[in-house]
Image: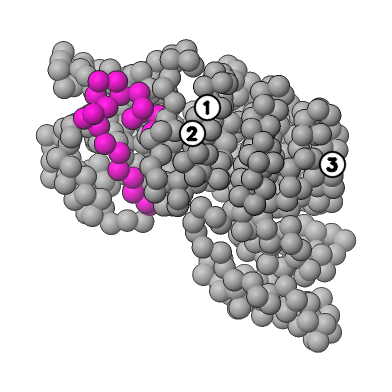
Amino acid sequence: MTILLSTLNARYAHASLGLRYLLANMGELKGETRLQEFVIGAKTTEIVERILAHAPRIVGFGIYIWNVEETTRVVAMLKRVAPHITVVLGGPEVSYETGEQEIVKLADYVVTGWGEVTFPQLCRAILHGPQPLMKVHAGVQPPMADIALPYAEYSDADLAHRTLYVEASRGCPFKCEFCLSSLDKTAWPFPLDAFLAELESLYQRGARLFKFVDRTFNLNVKTSMRIMQFFLDKIDAAPHDPVYAHFELVPDHLPDALKEQIAKFPPGALQFEIGIQSFNPEVQANVSRRQDNAKAAANIRWLASQSHAHLHVDLIAGLPGEDIDSFARGFDQLWALGPHEIQFGILKRLRGTPIIRHTENFGMVYDPYPPYTILATDRITFTDMQRLVRFARYWDLVANSGRFTHTLPVLLAAAPFAQFMAFSDWLYAHTDATHRIALDRLAKLVEQYLREARALPAEEARALVASDIAGKHREPHDSAAAPIRQARHLAA
């Protein structure tokens, strides 16, 4: 074995789609290439030892915002104990602002952007000459039909235990400045028939959970409908062998034909991730986000009331020009639309994104270390930003978990954001923690808050929380976790 492709995933269940694309496109070098994935949190010495066990000549690492710090330590150790091994980096974290990064200084070469053509070419030059003169190599973007699809590289173990990431297209036509896809000129579709054939192959091998990473799944409605029909056909043919599909949806683009198709999916089969980010038109303009808020709201309301799709809707705190009151209004507006989950995110300054242009005008202060989270703006102080961070964590534990379905409306009452912020402040004051709060303890704290802060009679508070917690246990971190979490919401 000559070439090892590796990365540190956030969890074992996250199988790297990018590495499998590289493996599928190695050409005559594919027989000399292997893939080995790790999980963040593993000991650096153990990772290096396992890499060296393959005796590779080249190691390619996929670098992302969540693994760059740990991978930097891996590369540093690898170059100390095995300096003869050539280290090549790729991935979004090293594709921009490349020269200033410590991991780039440690490595031998970097491929920025698309890697399917450029990485194999670089490996050929390293192995057979002439030796590359430049350290940084800009990835060549080939025609989509020329890219070998990676889905045969998912192993049987992947299919049995991990989330399968798939994509019918790459890129995005929108220019939201906080997103790396804002640098794309458009979205590029893969040939649809070939892609559907790969989905069929995965299904025949036993795959039942498909997570689409397309940024704009419903941009081309005809393509969207063909893909969704693929899953409907599987459900119709085997209703007792469920398929689960996750799509990222453009919220203000949902024509009637697509609605009719969505309405055919049974409970537990379909999830939409919908990026609202902000309902404030001025904030949207600041980050170049085009969104018809009225249409987006109407579509979310329709999906919540007229379909069985599970709705995971995103908001981002800390955007330029948005204060807490503005964010609170957007949060309350979104809650009233009835999504199953509100993913409350805190702005991160991804390398290369245009959001950096607002730093001075809006007093944007970011953590200098990954994941480069916003710490303060001219509208939100550092202290209040930390309150929002805790709100987001507790919201995930209490609301998004689906464990407090009956308790949550009482907790939120007529002012969801304000009431939950008060609960969040109280919970932090009583625990001094945002992690490692066991479910039983959390339930007792929710009950205590309802009694002490909301003056709910003790027996009523106890019965309310008990009605939610009875029989509910923490779901495992495996490929079935998302459908289990969805089932909790649907069963409520």
Q: Which mark is residue 197?
A: 1
Horizontally, residue 105 falls left or right of residue 219, namely: left
Answer whether labels 2 and 1 touch (C-beta < 8 Å). Answer: yes
- The quadrant in which residue 170 appears is top right
Question: Which residue bears the numbered disc 2?
Answer: 201
- Residue found 66% across the figure and 80% down from its top: 444
Q: How many marks?
A: 3
- Residue found 68% across the figure and 37% down from its top: 232
Q: Position of residue 248 (x, y in %)?
A: 64, 36
Give the alpha-carbon distance from disc 2 to disc 3, as whole Å. 34 Å
Q: Is residue 77 visible?
A: no
Q: Which mark is residue 411?
A: none
Q: Nearer the viewer, residue 159 or 445?
A: 159
Q: Position of residue 395 (x, y in %)?
A: 67, 60
* Badge 3 element: helix
Residue most toward the front? 237
- Give the amino acid at mark 1: Ala
Give the alpha-carbon distance from disc 3 to disc 1, as whole Å. 32 Å
Answer whether labels 2 and 3 touch (C-beta < 8 Å). Answer: no
Note whether 388 is above or below 141 in the view shown.
below
- Give the amino acid at mark 3: Trp
Q: Nearer the viewer, residue 16 or 356?
A: 16
Note whether 323 is above or below 384 in the view shown.
above
* Front label number (3 vs 1): 1
Number of residues whose C-alpha sits closer than 10 Å to that of mark 3, classed few (under 14), some (14–19) or many (20 or more): some
- Give the amino acid at mark 2: Ser
- Residue found 22% across the figure and 54% down from its top: 45
**Quadrant of image for the N terminus:** top left
Question: Which residue bears the numbered disc 3?
Answer: 302
Answer whether labels 3 and 1 touch (C-beta < 8 Å). Answer: no
Q: What colouring style does the render use?
A: one colour
